[in-house]
Amino acid sequence: MVQHLRRPDDAAGEFGTKNMPRRVFLGLLGGAAALGVIAPGIQAKLAGSVVGGAVGLDGYQIYTVTGGIPTFDPATYRLRVDGMVRRPLSLGLHQLGALRPDTLHATFQCVTGWQVPNQVFEGVNLSRLLAEASPLSGARYLNFYSFDGTYTESLPIRVALGPGAMVVTHLDGKPLSANHGAPVRLFVDHYYGYKSIKWLSRIEASSQPITGYWEHYGYPENAKIG
Ligand SMILES: Nc1nc2c(c(=O)[nH]1)N[C@H]1C(S)=C(S)[C@@H](COP(=O)(O)O)O[C@H]1N2
Ligand SMILES: [Mo]
């Protein structure tokens, strides 16, 4: 079941309330507030937002701020790495598939309180892509763009160079599903799920972070858990 998250002008939040019993919604909100991440003003804004949701069979809630699951053409899809780099990359699915895979065992954790433990992520560590693209010394952030045309995120390069930041192609041994961001999504271990942008198509090295989609509505840029 897909949770359609609309733009915050008609629905301000990741916390859906339409079709959701009020008690459940308040419970979710309370959980996020207990995590200490959502400021009271944002809570009020989110409480006014309305979208429905259900937990998928695999334990995830499927989020999409555009209200749809974007499609792509496998023949023309490219993951670009550009901006402040010496060697811009443009990788097709064959090239991505030919890379030796990295593996990461981790828990997926959304800021609203749900989590999915014991996940096996496979793909390419960002550090390897960066080694290939060779960021310039002034590049301090990576900015991420989705081909859904709306969702964005950022990450300090020092985090991207760590072992927990991966461009994911496979989840639990299977190619990433469309709902989870096919053909590739980001996963950042120890960071809330909103950093893990789906339907990823561009990674831009920059001296500055862009304001990510949820950051624009008040989520902290630093989404580190704990
Ligand atoms: N493109 C895009 N990426 C996204 C989102 C989104 O709505 N659109 N939601 C984020 C949030 S808040 C979470 S918790 C995870 C959820 O991942 P899932 O939909 O695979 O469960 O995706 C993140 N990446
Ligand atoms: Mo999330």
Image (spheres, grey):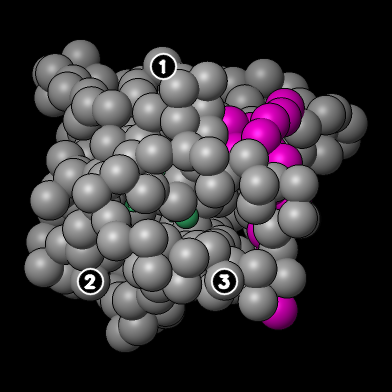
* Mark closer to the observer (2, 3): 3
Q: Secondary structure at mark 2?
A: loop
Q: CA distance from mark 3 to mark 1?
A: 31 Å
Q: Secondary structure at mark 3?
A: helix
Quickly name the residue at label 2. Answer: 59
Q: CA distance from mark 2 to mark 3?
A: 20 Å
First along the sequence among labels 3 and 1: 3
Quickly name the residue at label 3. Answer: 30
Mark yes or no: residue 154 visible: no
Residue 50 falls in which quadrant of the image? top left
In this picture, is 125 found above or below 75? below
Query: Where's the C terminus, which quadrant?
Result: bottom right
| Picture disc at residue 86 | none
Q: Residue 34: give x, y in percent of width and height.
A: 65, 76
First along the sequence among labels 1 and 2: 2
Give the residue at x 67% y 19%: 83
In this picture, is 156 found above or below 102? above
Dot 3, crowdedness within 10 Å: few (<14), some or many (≥20)?
Answer: some
* Residue 119 part of the magenta-drawn span: no
Q: Residue 211: give x, y in percent of width and height.
A: 71, 29
Quickly name the residue at label 1. Answer: 149
Amino acid beneath label 1:
Gly
Q: Residue 148: give x, y in percent of width and height.
A: 35, 22
Dot 2, crowdedness within 10 Å: few (<14), some or many (≥20)?
Answer: few
Q: CA distance from mark 1 to mark 2?
A: 26 Å
Amino acid beneath label 3:
Gly
Left or right of 226: which side holds 175? left
Residues drawn in magenta: 210-226
